[in-house]
């Protein structure tokens, strides 16, 4: 009887693991593009863009002057074609910090006069758009995501 009970428990655990594995593959995050920018104490806006390509991902980082935003004069710092592995790293990072759950985040702290603003737009493979923005208020794991995301740009050049 004990062997039968242990066998049933083992089978239940195995089926649960298989189900979780299949579900995680179905829910895998894949992006078409991501645009993330911040502004801070200076009048510059720091922008990071990544767009899926046939062979991986095109990545670019640049600054623009807020005063000259309409003319979009870019001071390009980083511009390169990344590998499929880099593309997958970005998808994993978005999944790791549950960035898709930030969709609709729009908060600010009006008491701070000279702080940091961020804006994020991600277009997923299924054409769903994720947007988030904030001024001196940030979603959960924002700092960790930004640190790792911007590091991918620096480390890949």
Image (tube, rainbow, N blue to C red):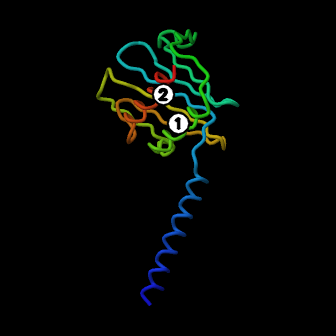
Q: Quick one: label 1, few (<14), some, or many (20+) residues within 10 Å?
A: some
Which of 15/3 is in front? 3
Q: Earlier in the sequence, mark 1 or mark 2?
A: 1
- The residue that mark 1 highlights is 89
- Residue drawn where x is 55% and y is 11% of the image: 74
Q: Position of residue 84 (x, y in %)?
A: 62, 33
Disc tally is: 2
Query: With 132 as the anchor, is 125 left or right in this view?
Result: right
Against 14, residue 118 (above or below) is above
Q: Position of residue 143 (x, y in %)?
A: 37, 33
- Residue drawn where x is 49% and y is 80% of the image: 8
Which of 124/3 is in front? 3
Which of 2/105 is in front? 2
Q: Position of residue 50 (x, y in %)?
A: 58, 27
Which of 23/18 is in front? 18
Query: With 88 as the anchor, is 148 left or right in this view?
Result: left
Figure quadrant of residue 54: top right
Figure quadrant of residue 53: top right
In space, the residues marked 1 and 2 are separated at their CA atoms by 8 Å
Q: Position of residue 128 (x, y in %)?
A: 62, 42
SS class, disc 2: helix
Q: Quick one: label 2, few (<14), some, or many (20+) residues within 10 Å?
A: some
Figure quadrant of residue 115: top left
Q: Quadrant of the N terminus?
A: bottom left
SS class, disc 1: helix
Against 44, residue 92 (above or below) is below
Q: Residue furthest right?
A: 54
Against 9, residue 76 (above or below) is above
- Residue drawn where x is 65% and y is 41% of the image: 125
Q: CB atoms at circles 1 and 2 under 8 Å apart?
A: yes
Q: Residue furthest front?
A: 3
- The residue that mark 2 highlights is 152
């Amino acid at each position: 009887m004990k062997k039968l009970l242990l066998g049933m428990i083992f089978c239940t655990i195995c089926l649960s693991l298989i189900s979780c594995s299949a579900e995680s593959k179905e829910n895998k995050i894949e992006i078409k593009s991501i645009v993330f920018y911040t502004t801070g104490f200076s009048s510059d806006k720091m922008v990071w863009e990544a767009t899926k390509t046939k062979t991986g991902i095109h990545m670019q980082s640049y600054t623009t002057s807020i005063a000259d935003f309409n003319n979009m004069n870019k001071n390009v710092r980083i511009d390169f074609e990344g590998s499929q592995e880099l593309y997958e790293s970005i998808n994993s990072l978005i999944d790791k910090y549950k960035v898709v759950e930030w969709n609709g985040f729009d908060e600010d702290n009006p008491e701070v006069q000279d702080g940091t603003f961020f804006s994020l737009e991600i277009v997923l493979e299924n054409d769903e758009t994720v947007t988030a923005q904030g001024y001196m208020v940030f979603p959960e794991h924002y700092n960790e995501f930004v640190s790792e995301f911007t590091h991918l740009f620096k480390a890949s050049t």
